[in-house]
Amino acid sequence: MPHHTPVRPHPRASMPPPPRPPVAAPAPAAPCPIRVAPSRRRIPAVPRAVSVAASHAHDAAFLRRAADVADRSAGLTCPHPNFGCVIARPEPGGPEARVVGEGFLYAQGTRCAELLAAEEAGERARGATAYLNLEPGDCYGDSTAVSSLVQAGITRVVVGLRHPLKHLRGKAIQSLRSEGIQVDVVGEDLQSKLFKEALTSCLIVNAPLLYRAAFRVPFSVLKYAMTADGKIAASSGHASWVSGRASRGRVFELRGRSDAVIVGGNTVRRDDPRLTARHVKGHVPVRIVMSQTCNLPEEANLWNVHEAYTIVATQRGARRDFQKKLAMKGVEVVEFDMLNPRDVMSYCYDRGYLSVLWECGGTLSAAAISARVIHKVYAFCAPKIIGGVTAPTPVGDLGMNQMTQAIDLIDVSYEQIDRDMLMSGFIQPIPDLSPVIPSADEIPSVDPEVSPYETNIISFYKTWDTFGAFSNFSPHPIDMPDEKGDCLTWPTVEHYYQAHKFVGVDNPQANDIVQEIKQARSPEEAARIGRTRQREFPELIRPDWESMKIDVMYRALKCKFSTYAHLTEMLLSTAGSVLVESSPHDLFWGGGREGEGLNYLGRLLMQLRSEILGTV
Ligand SMILES: NC(=O)C1=CN([C@@H]2O[C@H](COP(=O)(O)OP(=O)(O)OC[C@H]3O[C@@H](n4cnc5c(N)ncnc54)[C@H](OP(=O)(O)O)[C@@H]3O)[C@@H](O)[C@H]2O)C=CC1
Ligand SMILES: Nc1c(N[C@@H]2O[C@H](COP(=O)(O)O)[C@@H](O)[C@H]2O)[nH]c(=O)[nH]c1=O
C-alpha cells in the first residue's frame, strides 16, 4: 500500500497574508478565453432540486473561478505551480450557491491557497465544497493544504487536474478521501462536457508546470511583432516601433509571467533592449542573451544588473576576456559546448524555470522552433507596411519549401489590441498527463526500475520538487535570537539568511535593509532584495560575511529542523544518502552543473542529520 502522509496540523501562520486582491482580479495578461468574474459574484441561480447537469454546471463555474483565482500571482512573483481554491456553499434556504472563501498561492514558500480560502470562509466552510484547479502539492511533509480543508469541515472537493509531478500525483486526493471527504476529479468522477471550458482554464493556468513535467524544459513562448507585410524591422534593422503602446503593454505582462526572456546576439547589437516588465513592483524576469561569438557591445542596457539579472549563454571559450568584463559588471556567463536552444532550455529547466519568453529575431526563433522547444506563439500584427527585401522576418529558415509543410497553430485565439491584431496559438498542445503518469494509488510501492543499490544521491532544489522542504524557500518560520538576545520570528530561512548579510553593521541604512528583507512577502522577494542591495551597497555588507555565512545558515537550519518534527523525520529518512542542492549556478551552496559546486547547503543538512543521529 502506498504510504500516505498523515494529516498534520499546518505550521504556524508563516507569512502575513498578501493584501486582499482587488475585487475584480487584474485582467489576465494572456489573451486566454477565461475572464475573471468580479469577486463575490453570485453564480447563476440553480434550483435546489437540481439535475445532475445543473449541478455539473455549478461545479464547472466554480472550478473556472478557481483557475481564475490561481492566476492572480501572475506578474507579482516568479512563475510557480498555480493553485487557486474557491469554497462555495448553497445559501441557507435559497437556491443559489455562494463563494464564502477563496485564496491563491502568492509565491513559493507562502501560505497555500486552501489555507487562505479556509481562513476566509471560517465557519461557513463547514459542509461546503472546495474547488481546486490543481491537486494540492503538499511537498513539505506537513500536508498543510489537506489539513486546512479537513479542519475547515469541507465535505466535498472538486479537482480540475491531478498534480503532474510524480512524487505528488494522487497523494493529496488520497489523503482527502482517507479523511472521508468526497473528492471528484474532472475527467474521472466528473465526465460531463460541461467541464470542457473549466478544464481548459485549469490547463492554461498551469500550462508551464504541465510542459515542464512532460518535456523537462520550461514552457516556451515565442513572441514577435510584425508589420502587415511580415517584417519585424526595417531592412536597416530599425524596429521601434512595429506594434503599438497597448500591445507592448501586453508584452510587459507576458514578461512578468516569465522566469526568463531570451534574445539573440543580433537583437542585442541592433536594439540594445532592456527586456524588463516595466511594472513598478513585482516579478522581473532574468534576461538571457544567446550569442555563439560573444561578440557583444561593451556597454548595453542588459549589463545594468540593478534593473534585472542578466545571463549570457555563449560557446565555450568565446572571448574569455570579454566574458570577464561581463562578470565584473555582475552579468552571469554560462558556457555551452555547442550553444543551441535545446541545451539552453535544459539548463533553464535545471534552474527551476517554468516559463520562458523568446523575444529573439528570426534567426534564433527558427533554431528554437526546429529544436522543438517552442510551445506557443504570440504574433502581434500591426496594420503597417514597411517593405524591404532584406527586412528581417519573424522566423528564419526552417528547411521547409512546400506550404503543406507549414506548422499549424492549434487552439488559436484572436484579439484586437488597439490597431494591432494578436494571434496566439500552440505549436504543441498542452500535454494531458492523466494517462502518462499513474497517480499515487496506482504507483507500485517500489519503483521496479530503481534497484535498491541505485546511487544514493538525493537532489533537492525547488520547493515543489521532491524534498522541497529542504529548500530555504520552504514556508517554515524560525524563531531566532537577535544580537540583543531577543527572539524574532523570521518567515523562512531565506529571509533570515539574506537579512544577516546586513546585521551588525553600524549604519541605519543597513538596519532598514534588514527590516525590508524581514517584511518581504515571500522568500523569493527576500532573496531578490538581499541580492540587489548587496550589489547596490556592498559597503553595507557585514565585513565578516564571507567567513560567517556558513554559520548563519547552519544556525537557521538547526532551528528549522528542530522546530518542525516532521522535517527532522524527513531529514532522517535520507540517512545514508548524499544530499545535493541541485542548483546549476550557485556553486557555493549548490552542486553546480557538473558537480563542481561546493554544495554547502547539502553538506550542512547532512551535518545536521549526523548530529541528530548522534553520529558526528
Ligand atoms: N519586432 C519584433 O518583435 C522583434 C524584432 N527584432 C529585430 O530582429 C532583428 C534581429 O533578428 P536576427 O538577426 O534574426 O537576430 P536574433 O535575435 O535571432 O539573433 C541571432 C543571433 O543569435 C545568436 N545565436 C545563438 N545561438 C544560436 C543558434 N543556435 N542559432 C542561431 N543563432 C544563435 C547568434 O548570435 P551571435 O552572432 O552573437 O553569435 C546569432 O547571430 C533586429 O533588427 C531586431 O530589431 C528582434 C526581436 C523581436
Ligand atoms: N520592435 C518591437 C519589439 N521588439 C522586441 O522588444 C525588444 C525591446 O524591448 P524593450 O527594450 O524592453 O522595450 C527588442 O529587443 C525586441 O526583442 N517588440 C514588440 O512587442 N513590439 C515591437 O514593435
Image: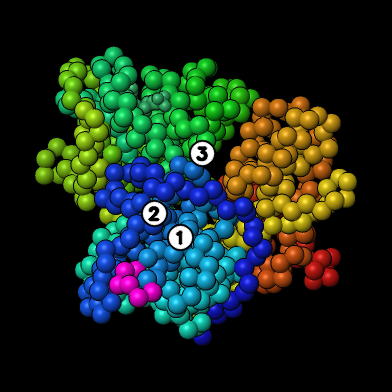
Q: Alpha-carbon neighbours of circle 1 within 10 Å: few (<14), some, or many (≥20)?
A: many
Above or below, 178 relative to 199: below
Ligand 1 is found in the corner quadrant, namely top left
Where residue 386 sits: x, y (%)? Answer: 19, 18
Q: Residue at x 72, y 46 (%)?
A: 497
Residue 262 seen by the camera: no
Above or below, 99 relative to 353: below
| First along the sequence among labels 3 and 1 | 1
| First along the sequence among labels 2 and 3 | 2
Instruction: Check disc 2 and report its element: helix, strand or loop.
Output: loop
Callouts 3 and 1 close, C-beta under 8 Å: no
The residue stretch that appears in magenta = 92-97
Residue 282 image label: 3
Where residue 317 sits: x, y (%)? Answer: 54, 30
Residue 166 lies in the magenta stretch: no
Q: Residue at x 34, y 29 (%)?
A: 248
Q: Residue at x 29, y 58 (%)?
A: 200
Instruction: Check disc 1 and report its element: helix, strand or loop.
Output: strand
Q: Main secondary structure of the magenta part?
A: loop
Of tags 2 and 3, the one toward the viewer is 2
Identify which amino acid the numbered label 2 is placed on: Ser
Q: Report which residue position mark 2 lands on.
A: 39
Q: Residue at x 43, y 20 (%)?
A: 272
Colouring of the image:
rainbow
Give the Cα separation between the discs numbered 3 and 1. 22 Å
Of tags 2 and 1, the one toward the viewer is 2
Q: Report which residue position mark 1 lands on.
A: 102
